[in-house]
């Protein structure tokens, strides 16, 4: 109840100080003796969370936002009025926006094994966390966790606030995996499910694509089977992983437009096999910057959680989708090269086949997978109608 | 002249022993004191080559086939009647086929820095070659080479056979880069140019995608800045590079069909962060097998040659394409995720804009980039008409 009161207080504090602007702050939530999906125990898990808008009296206006692979609970608003960047979906979350914080209590939490452990605005538990049994970081002693574990932590957080019903759960990319698993695992909770740039299971292709992200980390001699916390971390491997992730999440038009001065016959790479094209240096630097707040082991665990994903985490996808009672909306991005539209289509088609209410539309743009983040505004009207409409 | 005689003899020997079957053997060609595009000297380069069909009296029936990134001069036929696999484009090269060896003298050579240095049927010169100055492999002392260098070696080979005109040059993927550069650099030679799954320059997107292939090799601690010839080679890095190359050259439908028993929630990866899904083990093993005949430094040099590519290797793409006088045919694959159809379209559109004869069509299929290899038969009639038709 205390946490609930704090949550309410926070949501009051986050009323817009500037018109249509949310000011938000991070809170923390812990669970003792957390049991993972694969039957292991973690003595204590702690995650960060944020909320926007006010919880109504019967706690029936809750929308849960679940974050993407390299994202966090910072879905909307700014931490201070001077913040240069708002949360990633600020375009659709806020007063009067598609996910209207004048109506809904919107809440989002950091996942377990969140990549950005060194970001001061992220609170997570994973291999970089101190293992109370040894006084040292878990490293690879941390159990493999699944999307279901992310969901179960969110459920405990919501229960701590007295919530037992979600008006909707909405997430992009890895967040979409959580949204679908929520709808399948806890159908009594979930009234509406929105999957943006998502999939209903990791197929063979995607499992391989994800594995490519782990490879550079494992190759880096500093990785040391995950025991690098006393030494030098595998920064180069992590940087290379992020270069791959970044490119796979984009689309040629966008990169070629951004780097329109690129010249194939640059002198340095023509004369020296160890020199790189300017465009390579640009991506390397951008990835190195992102790597500076991330932990390499956490990325390995995130990859694994996504590889293990199947809606419902049961015996079959069919069974997992059969459990869903929520009204569903799938919004893949047409030019997505990472989770192509066929993956969302598979979920939508199967739900329709099972006689369940489901809508499907595509987000267009030149940023590929990231159109689901940066062009979400395109689907604002559809989202609003879906969320405000009847079941 | 001696080489020419041997070539003729070989082409006689390779007359079909079984109906529509070519028996072929590898020959070798050397150049002393080869000057590279970037102005360096290589004391001796040696490459392998094969030919199919007979050179006519006025040497006007020559079709040059240029190979792809992980390919070789083995474009058609079998080395022995027992060979399980013919050359990669056997479907379209042979007696009575689209590239009809009853009419044409078809020739293909291994490129410089060919990846498969340990394949007994590949002859190449690159970082793994002994540097006569030191008695040890060149390693990274080998100069950076370009697609133009590959072309110049082929030109010397053809000249050694008394040839100075190409009825056509035809190549898939990296072979297409060579074909286009041939048409731009030596327009007096090239009457017809066929680019299959190709590009006319490496744009920013592609330069980055190629760089991702180098990253795992450079990360492998055994790479040692390319000086691994006395020790353990960077096999894991090379294997990871090949996993990436293989996946990028394919398309989801194909992999998902092939691995239709894939189950996301496999027990081993669920319980152990160091265990992998079966599908990952499958790709790892396939890549490790390919890696066993390849040299990691050669892959780095091939990547660089492709990154540096611009048709004509001059001041601009416009200038490079302006030089072309050949009749052109572009055949990208619709589902190609590596060199998407827009790249071939760019070349075709610019040539048409310049008032030059160019045709464009797409190869359809589920194997992505590799549809240009495995589904080339689809374009057999178009190819035949293009090759047999007037200028």
Image: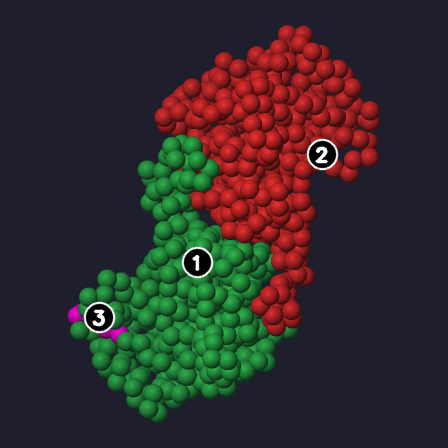
Chain colours: A red, B green
Res A279 → quadrant: bottom right
Q: Are marks 1 and 2 on the same chain?
A: no
**Which residue lies most toward the left here?**
B18
Examine the residues drawn in magenta and state their main secondary structure: loop
The local crowd at label 3, few if under 14, some if 14 to 19, many if 20 or more residues have their Cα within 10 Å, is few
The local crowd at label 1, few if under 14, some if 14 to 19, many if 20 or more residues have their Cα within 10 Å, is many
Judge from the rendering whether residue B305 lies leftward or rightward of residue A377; answer left or right. left
Q: Secondary structure at mark 3?
A: loop
> Which range is magenta?
B18-24
At 51% across and 34% down in the image, what residue appears?
Answer: A141
Q: Are marks 3 and 2 on the same chain?
A: no
Q: Which mark is residue B209?
A: none
User: Where B329 sits versus B244, above or below?
Assistant: below
Residue A195 image offset from top left, x and y in percent: 53, 29
Residue A346 visible in the current orientation: no
Q: Subunit of mark 3?
A: B
At 43% across and 69% down in the image, what residue appears?
Answer: B114
Task: Say whether disc 1 or disc 3 marks the residue closer to the N-terminus.
Answer: 3
Q: Which residue is mark 1?
A: B235
Residue B299 image offset from top left, x and y in percent: 48, 64
At 33% across and 45% down in the image, what residue appears?
Answer: B258
Residue B230 visible in the current orientation: yes
Of residues B52 and A106, which is closer to you in this image?
A: A106
**Which residue lies most toward the top here?**
A58
Of residues B270 and A182, which is closer to you in this image?
A: B270
Q: Which residue is mark 3?
A: B80
Res A116 → quadrant: top right
The local crowd at label 2, few if under 14, some if 14 to 19, many if 20 or more residues have their Cα within 10 Å, is few
Residue A364 image offset from top left, x and y in percent: 58, 41
Q: Nearer the viewer, mark 1 or mark 3?
A: 1
At 64% across and 36% down in the image, what residue appears?
Answer: A117
Q: Which mark is residue A120?
A: 2
């Amino acid at each position: 109840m205390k946490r609930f009161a704090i949550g309410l207080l926070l949501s009051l504090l986050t009323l817009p100080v500037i018109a249509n602007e949310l000011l938000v702050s991070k809170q923390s939530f812990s669970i003792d003796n957390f049991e993972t999906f694969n039957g292991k125990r973690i003595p204590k898990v702690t995650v960060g969370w944020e909320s926007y808008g006010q919880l109504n009296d019967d706690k029936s206006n809750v929308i849960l936002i679940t974050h993407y692979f390299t994202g966090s609970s910072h879905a909307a608003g700014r931490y201070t009025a001077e913040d240069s960047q708002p949360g990633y979906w600020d375009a659709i979350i806020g007063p009067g926006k598609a996910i209207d914080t004048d109506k809904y209590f919107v809440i989002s939490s950091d996942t377990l094994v969140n990549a950005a452990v060194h970001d001061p605005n992220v609170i997570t538990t994973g291999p970089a966390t101190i293992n109370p049994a040894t006084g040292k970081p878990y490293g690879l002693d941390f159990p493999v966790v699944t999307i279901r574990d992310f969901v179960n932590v969110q459920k405990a957080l919501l229960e701590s606030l007295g919530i037992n019903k979600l008006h909707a759960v909405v997430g992009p990319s890895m967040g979409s995996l959580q949204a679908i698993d929520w709808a399948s695992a806890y159908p009594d909770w979930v009234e509406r499910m929105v999957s943006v740039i998502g999939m209903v299971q990791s197929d063979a292709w995607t499992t391989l694509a994800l594995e490519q992200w782990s490879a550079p980390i494992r190759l880096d001699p500093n990785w040391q089977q995950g025991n690098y916390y006393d030494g030098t971390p595998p920064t180069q491997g992590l940087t290379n992983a992020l270069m791959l992730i970044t490119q796979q999440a984009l689309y040629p038009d966008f990169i070629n437009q951004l780097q329109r001065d690129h010249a194939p016959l640059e002198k340095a790479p023509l004369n020296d096999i160890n020199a790189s094209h300017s465009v390579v240096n640009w991506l390397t630097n951008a990835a190195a910057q992102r790597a500076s707040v991330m932990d390499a082991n956490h990325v390995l665990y995130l990859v694994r959680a996504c590889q293990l994903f199947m809606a419902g985490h049961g015996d079959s996808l069919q069974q997992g989708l059969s459990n869903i009672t929520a009204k569903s909306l799938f919004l893949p991005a047409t030019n997505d090269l990472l989770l192509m539209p066929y993956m969302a289509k598979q979920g939508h088609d199967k739900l329709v086949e099972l006689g369940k209410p489901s809508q499907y539309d595509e987000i267009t743009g030149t940023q590929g997978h990231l159109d689901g983040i940066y062009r979400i505004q395109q689907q604002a009207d559809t989202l609003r109608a879906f969320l405000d409409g009847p079941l």
